[in-house]
Image (cartoon, helix red, strand yellow):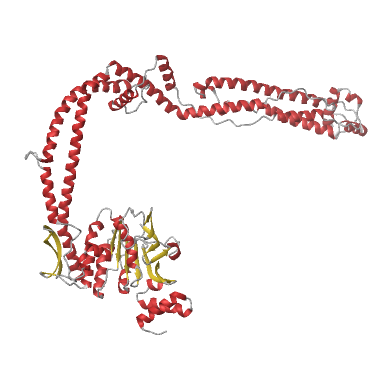
Amino acid sequence: MITKIDIERFGLFSNYCWKQHIGTENNHIFSKMNIIYGRNYSGKTTLSRIFRCIEMKQLHNNYHNGIFAITTDNSTITNTNLVCSDKVRVYNTDFVRENLSWLSNEEGDIKPFTLLGSNNVKAEKRITEINEVLGGIDAKKGLLYRKWQIEENLQKRKQQFAKAKEKIQTLLTNKANREIKVNNYYVKQGTNYNIKTIQSEIDEIIDSEKSFIIDEKEKAIRKKRIDESVKQEIALLPITKPHLSEYIKEVQELLKRKIVLTQTLEELVTNTLLQKWVDKGRVLNKNRETCAFCGGIITPDRWKLLDAHFSKESEELKKSIEELLDKLERSKKSLDGFLETRGVKQENIYEIFQDEYNQYYKEWTLYIDQYRDTIDLLISQLQERYNDIFTPREINTIVDCSENIIEIINHFNSLLQKNKNKSSTITKDKDIYRKELRYSEIQSFINTIEYKKICKDWKNEEKCINSEEKKLDDLIKTIEELRQEKQTKELEAKDEGEAAKRINEHLSDFFGHDSLTLEPALITESNTPLTRFIIKRGEKEAHNLSEGECSLISFCYFIAKIEDELNGADHDKLIIYIDDPISSLDNNHIFFMYSLIETIVAKKGQYGQLFISTHNLDFLKYLKRLTSPMDVNRKPLVQYFLIEKRKKMSEAISCLKLMPSYLKDYVTEYNFLFHEIYNMAKGTTKGDKAKMIENQYTHFYNVSN
C-alpha cells in the first residue's frame, strides 16, 4: 500500500515534502480509501500522472526531468526505479487519450476506438498460422508429427539402454541397501541412503582421480571414534587463586608480634605449661574468691598480679591466633573435590585428550598436597606461639604454590574448552569418519566390478539418448509456447464482445443511455481486416458526442477494463486512481457516476487502495458517502486531502495537505471561502496567499475589497 509521496519536481509540484505539509503522526498517511479535493488547475491531474508513471513503468512524456519518491509498506518507488509490487490502474486524461483516441480528434469527428487493444481478425489469422505449424500425427506433418517420431525413436533406444544398465543398477542397489545402508560405520542409522546416493558418490570418487582406500589400521581407528559417545559439557573452572600468600603474611605478623609486660610472674614466664594451666584456671575462677580446684583463697592482690601478667594485649593476640587457625583449617579443605564436584573426571574427557588430562591431574594432586602441607606448617607454628604467647618467633621457610595451582587450573580450562569443542563437532567428525570408510569401501567395490569398463559400453548410447531428449524437450517447449499463444489469442477474441457488453450495461444501468452503445465492427487498415468497436446512437454510428457523453463512455470503458482485476484472486494488490471523472456532467449524471463507483468498486471492497480526486463539491458530497473500508476495530480506513495552488515568490506551486475539517465535515464551497475570508479578517493570512485569495474572490464573485 502507498503511504506517502515526496515530490522534488513534477509539473506544478516543487519541493513538496510530505513530512512538512502532512505531518509525521501515525495516521497522517494515505489510507485504503483516499478522497482528494482541489479546484480546477490546482494540480490534481499532475498528481495522478505520477501514479500513471508507475502503471506504465516509464516517466510521462511531459515530465522527463520529474523527481519524486513514493513510500509503500515495504519499499520506495522513485522516478528512477518505477517498480511496484502492486498493480496500479489510473483513470485520467492520459488514459482517455491513449485508449480512446477519438476524444482528441482535431477534426471534431468521433472515430471508432479499440477496446483493450484487441483485434479479432488478427487473432484468428495468428491462430490459423499456429495450427499450421503444429500440424498433426495423422496428417504426418508439423511439430506434433516430428515430436511423435522422436518419441518413438527414443523409446526403442531407451529399452536397449535399460538392458545395458540393468546389471550395474542391480549391483549398485544391493551395495547401497544391503551393505552400506545397514552398516553404522558407513552411514548413520536412519539415513536415506539409496542407489542415487551411491551413484552420486561413485561419480565423485571417479572425478576426483585420487585414492580413497585406507588400510585396516586406519579403519580400526575410525571405527573406534565412531563408537565414542558424546561427553557431558563441563563448565570452565573458576580462576580462584588460593590465599596462601596472605595467610603466610598473617601468620608471620602474629608470630613476630611482641607483648609488652608491665608486671610478670617469673614462675609462669619460665614454665610454659604452668602458664597455660594458670591461664585456663584464671578463666574458670573469674569473679571467685576461692579456687574451684583446691578451695584456697584468691586474694585481690593475687588477682591483680594474674591480670597484670595476662594482659589485654596477650588476650587479643590469642584471639587473633584462634581466628587465623580456624581460617587455615577451612582453607585446607577449600580445594577438596575442586575438580570432581565440577565434573572434571576422566570418564567425562574424550579419549583423544586422556593423556593430557592424566598429566594435569598428576600435577594438580602434587600441588594440592603441597598446598595442604604448607597450611599444616602454618597451623603448627601458630599453635606453638599460642602455647607460648609471650615469646615471639620467626616463621619457618614456606613454599607458596598458589601460582602453580592457577597454572594447572588454566591448563584444565584449556582442556575443557577443547573437550567442549569436540562435543560440538563430534557428530560432524563421525560423519567424516563414516564417509572415509564408505568411500574406501565403494572404491574397492567399483575396482572389483570394473565399473569404468561397464560404463564405457553404454556411455555413447547415453550421450545419443540425451541429445535426442534435448531435441524433444526443446520441441515440447516450442509446442507449449505456441499452444499458450493460441489460447491467449482465443481469450482475446472472446473478451472483446464481453467487454463491449459490460460497457453497454454500465451505460444503461447507471446512466440510462440505452441508445448509446458500443458494437464490434469489421474495418480495414492497410489492406488488413481488423475488428474494432464503434459507438452507435440507435442504429447509426455516433459522431460529435458531447463532452459529457465522452466522459461517461470513457469512465465506463475504464471500469470495464479493471473489472476482471477487481474480481481476481489478487485484487488486494490493485491500486486504483480515478482523477475527476465528472467532466461536463450535470448533477444527475454526477450521482450516477458515484453510483457506478460505489457499486462496482467501493461496496465490494475488493481493492488494495483507492484514490479519487474531484473539483466538484457536489461530487465530493457523494464521495463522502462511499462504502468505507474498515480496520479490525471497525474504524473507517478513509483519508481526506486537499490540493491547492500556493504562491511561492513569483511561481504558483501545488500543495497536497490534509483536508481541513470545515471542508471535510461540510459540503459547500461557501464554507471554504468563508474560512479563507475569516482568516484574512483575523490577519492570519498574509503575503502572496492573501493576494491570491483576494484575486480569486474578485474573479469568481465580482466583489470588491
- Could one spot residue 221 in this view of the protein? yes
| Residue furthest to the top | 216
- Could one spot residue 633 in this view of the protein? no
Depth order, front residue of 84/471:
471
Residue 617 higher or lower than 382, as above or below: below
In the image: residue 364, left or right of residue 183? right
In the image: residue 202, left or right of residue 337? left
Residue 151 higher or lower than 627, as above or below: above
User: In which image quadrant can residue 336 be found?
Assistant: top right
Quick one: quadrant of the N terminus?
bottom left
The percent position of residue 68, horizontal first and vertical second, equals 38, 59
User: In which image quadrant can residue 572 be found?
Assistant: bottom left
Depth order, front residue of 603/570:
570
In the image: residue 652, left or right of residue 465? right
The percent position of residue 44, horizontal first and vertical second, equals 34, 67
| Residue furthest to the bottom | 704
